[in-house]
Amino acid sequence: MPKLHTVYDFRNAAIIPAEAYLLLIFTTLGLLLFFYTKNYGAPGFIRSKSKYWGLAVGLFSLLIFLGIAATRFRDYYEVKSMFDQKQYSIIEGKVQDYHPMPASGHDTERFRVDSLYFEFSDFDWGKFGYNNAASHGGAIRPNQYVQIVYPTYGRITILILKTE
């Protein structure tokens, strides 16, 4: 058996995707526009109703961010609870039937280890687990020896990935 090193462990991963923090920029800009126009009036190039647009954009983007954060925290603690209760399995073997995700997206990366099938995409924030395709710097390659920890129930996701 080759010497393996840990590439991904869900316990060390960021709970909220970095892209979600971009919503806080819109929150800040919207609220700044609202408070500026409320306190100093609307400058000539901004209509008088712009403070309401600023408030709407700020609150809407904040609500989306909070929704993403709440969902991700729920998913993380669901997976962590399952992991703590040892409701997972471990599979080892060579990556077979490897299909890489194109750099443009619009597809998934998928492969098989023994008889177990794995599929993921960089653009899937749906469930907690490894989702870094090789086209975006991921670690999985054809015929590579891997060890994967995955849940014994629900959607098969990669909780811990070790590669040679």
Image: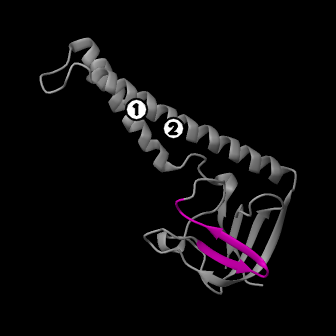
User: Does the magenta run of residues contain 11?
Assistant: no
Q: Which mark is residue 65?
A: 2
- Please give the name of the residue rendered at 73% of the width and 83% of the height, measured from the top-left corner: 2
Q: Disc 1 marks which residue?
A: 27
Number of residue marks: 2
Crowd around label 1: few <14 · some 14–19 · many ≥20 (10 Å): many
Magenta segment's dominant SS is strand
Which residue is more in the foreground, 42 or 92? 42
**43 lies left or right of 39:** left
Image: 6 above or below 24: below
| Pointer 1 with pointer 2, Cβ within 8 A | yes
Query: What residue type is disc 2 on?
Result: Phe
Q: In which quarter of the image is the N terminus?
A: bottom right
Q: Distance between the residues labelled 1 and 2?
A: 9 Å
Q: Is mark 2 on a helix, strand or loop?
A: helix
**124 lies left or right of 2:** left
Q: Quadrant of residue 58?
A: top left
> In this picture, which residue range is highlighted in magenta?
109-123
Q: Residue 35 carries which label?
A: none
Q: What element carries label 1?
A: helix
Q: Where is residue 144 in the image (x, y as percent from the top left)?
A: 65, 83
Image: 16 above or below 49: below
Q: Position of residue 65 (x, y in %)?
A: 51, 38
Image: 131 above or below 164: above
Q: How is the image coloured?
A: one colour
Image: 58 above or below 133: above
The numbered mark, 1 or 2, whose residue comes first in the sequence reads 1
